[in-house]
Amino acid sequence: MSATAYGWVVLAAPLVGMLIIALGWRVLPGRSAGWLGSAAIGVSFLASVGMLIRLLDSPEESRALVSSAYNYVETAGFRADLSILVDPLSVFMCLVVSGVSFLIHLYSISYMTSDQGFARFFAYLNFFVFSMLLLILAANFVLLLVGWAFVGAASYLLISFWYRRGTATAAGIKAFVINVIGDVGLVIGAFLLFDATGALDYAGIFAAAPEVFAENDGKLVAACLMILVGAFAKSAQLPLHTWLPDAMEGPTPVSALIHAATMVTAGVYLIARCHPLFELAPTAADVGAILGTATLIFAASVALAATDLKRVIAYSTMSQIGYMVLGVSIGAYGAGLFHLMTHAFFKALLFMGAGSVIGAMSGIQSLDRMGGFRKAMPFTFVTFTIGALALASFPLFSGFFSKDEILAYALERGGLYAILGVVGYIAALLTAFYAGRMVFRVFFGASVPEAQELERGQLAHGTHANPATGEEEDTDVGFPGAEHHIAEREWPMKAAMAPLALLAVVAGVLGIPGVTDTLEHFLEPTFEGSRFAEVHPSTSAELIGLAVGGVVAIIALAAAYRYFTGDPQARVATRERFAGVHRVLINKWYFDEIFDRAIVRPVAAFGRFGRTVVESAIVQGVLVGGTVGIVRAGTSLARSIQTGELRFYAALLLMGVSGLILYFLLVSS
Amino acid sequence: MLTIHLSIVVFLPLAAALLAALLPARVGRWLVVGAMAGVLGYAIAMIADYEAGTAGLKYVTDDNWISELGVRYQLGVDGLNLFLIALTALLWVPSTLWGAARISERPKLFLFHMALAETAVLGAFCAQDLALFVVFFDLMLVPFYFLVGQWGGGDRVRATTKLLIYTLVGSLLMLAGAIALGVLSAGGGDISFSFAVLEQRTLGEGTQQWIFCLFAAAFLVKAPLFPFHGWVVDTYRATPTPVLVVLSAVVSKVGVYGFLRIVLPILPDASAYFQDLMLVLAVFSILYGSVLAFSQEEPRLVVAYSSIAQLGFIVLGIFSLTDLGSQGALMQMVNHGLVVAPLFFIIAALSARAAGPATLEQMGGMALRAPVLAALFLVVTFATLAMPGSPNFVGEILILFGAFDDKFVYGAVGILGVVLAAVYMLRIFQRSMHNRAGPGVKPAELGSLELAAILPVAAVVVALGVYPQLVLDRTERATTTKVAPALTAAGASDSEISEAK
């Protein structure tokens, strides 16, 4: 089988899985929908490995293969095939996405067992994976848009999965609408490129771009900025980020899969995919780098104060994606994608651990209510800690190598980029601190009643309530299930978390400075010809960077340990001393409020104005007086434009019509 | 190549209805529905028979009708009307079926009017002679007047009066325009109303302009576009569901179809002259319709205003005066019909399950007990908001690319409508299907009639999303030839302006 044939299998497997589950949900017994869904993703992963092997077999210069199924849209010069592009970048993304997705499917089989929407969940999840793989494999902008929008739709469906919760459905709509803004950006960007190059497929555009665009050509910069709008909406970067924290309303496996490991990294993929354009439009690339850096520090600061465990991880995701965006915007493609991969491992792991803890807390997500789970949940404790250490880029964990590779690259490029790199190190300090905060507040300190019960072998089953509002929920009719599940008792959850924990520790070996550059070397054919191919921090510079990063991480973790396991009174005192800062952070820098005032309310007011004033003017005014007036105006218009007998007849006819209208008005009133 | 007599296709429903009048209602009902299914069969055969890239008319019928006035009975099919005929044929079947099952008051008469309406609409789409077009266009008024007036709900008198006045004014204006066009273009020679002849003849710019206004008024009222939509609210409230389905999905397309069939090729200079005005109307309709759609409490009105926005997109595409834009507009005419029809059936299903009057307040939480309804509603919702992967996306992206090409600002403002569509469509989906069920909501799965009306059309939507080229292949030649004269005229006036500078 050729690499592209494997590519089609990668796409087909989750689609078929989704269809079988969606159509057969009534007859599929027990947990079989979950196993079916997982198997479908397993097939995808194996086919991705098949692509990898085929690609490695072929010489480096022929590692970009396009396969077209049929002409999807072809009219009047607009041409987009249903075609896939198999190259090192797409294969790498397919491996990460299908691999992590498979493990999360496995985890979900346990986690969602008692949920009434079990089969629906797996149908959505398979649909999501299909869409994500379509986004990655698409060979042109139109198909990219299809995948792009489908993942948005899947995300909407999964965020509002527990649709009896008003908070969940509202969060779903918010996420979807912001994603549509991104789609619109991409459509405009695609048009600008199409207009200049006459092509919609990557190969055609990238080949024509250097011919038709001068460096920093206004049109190209505009196109790239529009692509950034798409990328930032999907990847929750400033200022299109407000949906991601709310998206935590979805079940925890969804947060792990879509809102941490895969979908939200699509923006990073897109920038990397379009790198020939961004290199031609350095201004746009700089905008990307600056906003990415702004996001990474902003989100890290909010993560310090947020009290909802899942939201802390969500802000951490935004922050880490900021690093990736910084990386791929400054030309550190290999490093950015390396971080994308390690982040997928440790962040999925963190969410899975959080899910396990939330299970033990019977749905409660507030850090304030947690504590002392170390003894009660040893497996969750160990794996979660591994994830947190990788996030904090503790020496020798995977995040340690990948994050520092980005920052070393930024410093190497100097100037503005060096400043961004320094900001990256400051945020790294915050990152390690909040990573420590999660571990120490959840697993250390005095045991909360739920932890004590669990130590006695009893899994808590409190009344079921919406963690956001405290509203009680009727689990008999589902949403979410009555029972909770923890990794300690469910082998599929363990089986999903163990490999991720292992990868979170060792994935760094793909890029140890001076020792290995496996990943970067594999990706090279995609980024061949990049003007930054020659920019390379020296091994000694990278090692110094690593040393600095390691020291930063250790200091911050130590500080977090002292602060969060120490005297609680001191914490209260600190919070009071910095009350102003704390208020800004806890309100997420007031982004939601600003958008509400600046956009949502004016549009709603316009709607009310239209409904009450304009409509009544048209419906009443135009009907009674207006129609006659329009007809009269039309008559005189015709008269003024044209002379001749026919005009007179037309006018006569119009006046006849006016009479008719008057008659009808009299009759009807 | 098949031999198809279009007269049979057009008059089959009417003939069946007349025959059915003599039979008992139970038998007659099936006769009429059967005839409509026959029309659908013809339409499918035509699509299959129509080779991609075909130019010119097929299955032409051309006879003298009123030779003194140069009026001919001329019917034909090309890429421009092929899919609109198919849309008509497809949607009349479930609508009539629905009506036959649900309407107990004078069912025979109801069926007769539905059949007459189909004949009139098919005639208007097939007509290749302006006078014949006007006859069918005005004939449409008659059955709809009775259908709304007799079987409507709520304030049906007010609704029919408004519908009648608005469309009658439009029709009469168009009549005047048609006569003027035939007479003036003849220039003292033989009067002809045949589109093919009219396209060859030329008219002075001033003449073109006022005739354009007459036609535009008729078509914009039919569509409708802001500010010609005064009849919409009352009509959409009062009209019975099966009638509303065809009214909104099909009849509204006759107007915009008229722009492509008549106005652009026959009045190219005027089309170029009024291009900006039409684009402003289109863009304003998109924004206005979208914003109002999400402040409505009645689902029917949400769809009503969303239709104004959608028709705005179609007019945006047509008056971008580009090949891409008009291809997108034609595609979108079909798509809008295909999503609006199931939407209205779904809204009828929702209203039947609502706690009180059919407002969003009285709905909610239905997905739990009616997952199939929810799934179909979801598919249609995503298609309506033109999600990539739906046929509506293909239509909209072609329209937008066409608009961006020369009129970037209009396209850029219009694209906001895409974002707003996501808001109002998800809003009605969420408010009816999700959240907690209100106390009086009676959620129940779709009945067999509801399923039979909704599922096939939704399936067509999905199929077109997978292979939109089915439509584009067959329409391309026709639309590009119809746009070409106006495109040239617009290009000429642009170069004049640049020369003047």
Image (tube, helix red, strand yellow):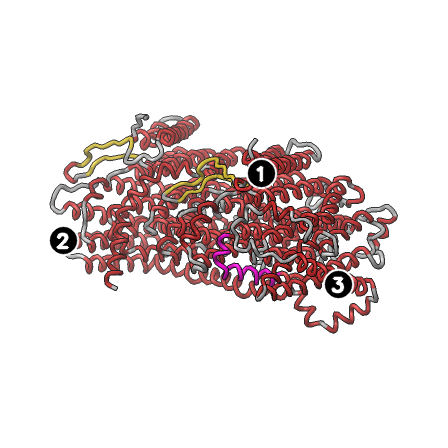
Classify mark 2: helix, strand or loop: helix
Query: Going 29% across and 40% down the picture, which residue do you hit?
Result: B136
Classify mark 1: helix, strand or loop: helix
Q: Which percent across, then down, holds residue A448? A: 83, 56
Amino acid of disc 2? Glu
With respect to residue B454, does A151 lie above or below?
Answer: below
The one nearer the camera, B294 or B388, is B388
Query: Going 19% across and 33% down the picture, which residue do you hit?
Result: B64
Q: Which percent across, then down, holds residue A195? A: 39, 51
Amino acid of disc 3? Ala
Q: Residues within 10 Å of mark 3 (few under 14, many from 20)?
A: many
Q: Residues within 10 Å of mark 1 (few under 14, many from 20)?
A: many
The one nearer the camera, A618 or A64, is A64
- Would you identify the image quadrant in which residue A94 lies? top right
Chain ID of residue with mark 2: A
- Would you identify the image quadrant in which residue B353 lies? top right
Mark 1 and mark 3 lie on one chain; the one further toward the N terminus is: 1
Q: Which mark is residue A556?
A: 3
Q: Provide the major secondary structure of the magenta segment.
A: helix
Residue where numbered disc 2 is placed = A645
Magenta stretch holds residue A291: yes
Magenta stretch holds residue A139: no
CA–CA distance in space, label 2 to label 3: 92 Å
Mark 2 and mark 3 lie on one chain; the one further toward the N terminus is: 3
| Same chain, labels 2 and 3 | yes
Q: Which percent across, then down, holds residue A378? A: 82, 49
Amino acid of disc 1? Leu
As drawn, is A322 to the left or to the right of A361?
Answer: left
The one nearer the camera, A309 or B499, is B499
Residue where numbered disc 1 is placed = A55
Q: Which residues are magenta?
A: A276-295
